Image (cartoon, grey):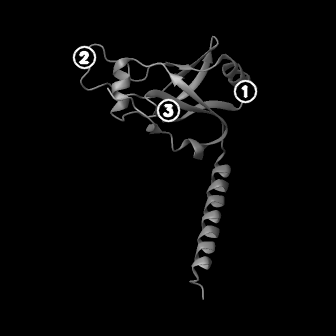
Amino acid sequence: MVKEVGRKLIAQNKKARHDYSIEDVFECGIVLTGTEVKSLRAGRASLIDGYATVENGELWLAGVHIPEYTQGTWTNHDVRRKRKLLVHLQEIKKLHIKIKEGGVTLIPLQLYFNNGKAKIEIAVARGKKAHDKRDSLMERQANREVEREISRRRSGKDQ
């Protein structure tokens, strides 16, 4: 069997960067069952309601939806079960300290295969208020207009 090389994106939490300000990002391994891996290889998962917690010195992922494998039998998995994340102990301690400070949460950003192994990118994030979201949208729009004007001037269309 040919070994899988490179990075294959499975699922992405697009609203996370809109709803939260990202402070730090970690890449974690994830403990999965066989039918979960097969379902992910089919490209099916949702990170929308997902979050991570530190419990008893271990990092756990909850709320992530990995649908049942269609050809699975009684061995199929629970679609929203808690899954253990594989991270170094020092990183878990850092995350636990940040969470205890308050006002931050751990949210999944991306789920992907990296060289055949399932990985998840989690972020230490602080929730944005409604006015912060509007400010970031206006800033992004202003940057887009500036870039558009610069490219228009470079091409010489304003003359």
Residue occupying the point 30% across, 25% down: 69
Q: Quadrant of residue 156?
A: bottom right
Q: Which residue is mark 2?
A: 73
**Residue indicated by mark 1:** 98
The disc placed on residue 49 is: 3
User: At numbered mark 1, what does the secondary structure look like: helix, strand or loop?
Assistant: helix
As displayed, is residue 90 above or below residue 137?
above
Is 126 placed above or below 38 here? below
Q: Do the numbered discs 2 and 3 sit on residues whose CB atoms are within 8 Å?
A: no
Q: Residue at x 64, y 69 (%)?
A: 146
Give the SS element for disc 3: loop
Residue 136 lies in quadrant? bottom right
Q: CA distance from mark 3 to mark 1?
A: 21 Å
Identity of the amino acid at label 3? Asp
Q: Amino acid at mark 2?
A: Thr
**Residue 98 x, y percent position in the rendering:** 72, 27
Residue 72 in picture, x, y percent from top left? 26, 20
